[in-house]
Image: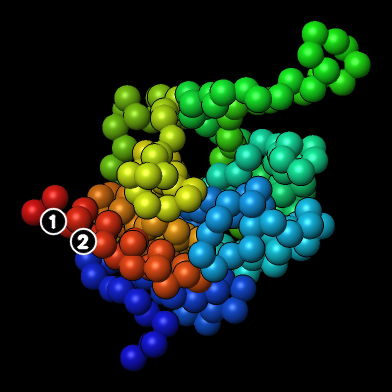
Amino acid sequence: MDTKLYYNADSVSIYNDDILKTDCIPHETIDLIVTSPPYNVDIKYNSHNDKISYEDYLIFTQDWITRCYEFAKDDGRLCLNIPLDKNKGGQQSVYADITTIAKKAGWKYHTTIIWNEQNISRRTAWGSWLSASAPFVIVPVEVIIVLYKNKWKKTGGSQKSDISREEFMGWTNGVWNFNGESKKRVGHPAPFPVELPRRCIKLFSFVGDTVLDPFLGSGTTLIACFETGRTGTGIEIDQNYCELAKQRLKCAVWEKI
């Protein structure tokens, strides 16, 4: 038995492991990767230092994106939820830098979806107030970069889609408007709502496909996998978050019974 396997039931699995070191995922077996990696904005995770230099953060990004490229099938895809930019600790073009890193790792670019969380926090800084000398511009959106490995058209899998006409028409519009998730309700410092992986999974994978989240956190991606009939695998370095994900999955299963 794999001692890193934390939970396995209803076609979803949680591994308490490090995506940079894991040997739990065979190469070229993943149809779709949906994830939101640490943002390096000093969020208080249990087992991850979210306050490293930007240069080290980009090296970390290159390492995990390269590993995910190895795990993906030839027609595998990656939906990567990240900030557009970063202003905490200095202005950084996060989206542009990570897109460039992904392409250097072999991923091919398809499109970018803008996620409007509709949750503009109270502004506390404007830079040079009422002056052109040094104003700050804050963009209250995140992005989902859609990448693929070698070919965009999916030729494998069940070829069965479960997306409705209304969903397809709405979601292929590249601006998504839905609320973020409550940290307090979920019990994790940086959760995303189930709606985000649910849309990515239904739009970019077939029923029965294998989906990976290399930064599982509170387990949201696996909940979406369970609800949409996909095989889901999550890697999470922190055991406490593995337990949180496990309990949330059990609740999702119970609610569906």
Residue 75 image position (x, y, % from top left)? 53, 57
Q: Residue furthest right?
A: 133
Residue 204 image position (x, y, % from top left)? 45, 45
Residue at the spot 33% in from the left edge and 68% down from the top edge: 243
Residue 112 visible at all: yes
Question: Residue 219: which quarter of the image?
Answer: bottom left
Residue at disc 2, secondary structure: helix
* Label 1 Cα crowd, 10 Å radius (few <14 / some 14-19 / many 20+): few
Q: Is residue 91 left or right of residue 154?
A: right
Residue named by callout 2 = 250
The amino acid at mark 1 is: Trp
- In this rendering, is residue 32 above or below 125? below
- In this rendering, is residue 227 above or below 164? below
Residue named by callout 1 = 254
Residue at the spot 29% in from the left edge and 65% down from the top edge: 246
The amino acid at mark 2 is: Lys
- For the residues labelled 1 and 2, the Cα–Cα distance comes to 6 Å
Residue 190 image position (x, y, % from top left)? 49, 48
Residue at the spot 31% in from the left edge and 53% down from the top edge: 223
- In this rendering, is residue 134 above or below 63? above
Residue 147 visible at all: no
Q: Nearer the viewer, residue 155 or 228?
A: 228
- In this rendering, is residue 120 above or below 228? above
Query: Do the residues bearing badges 1 and 2 touch, measured as CB atoms within 8 Å?
Result: yes
Residue at the spot 52% in from the left edge and 82% down from the top edge: 23
Quarter of the figure that contains the C terminus: bottom left
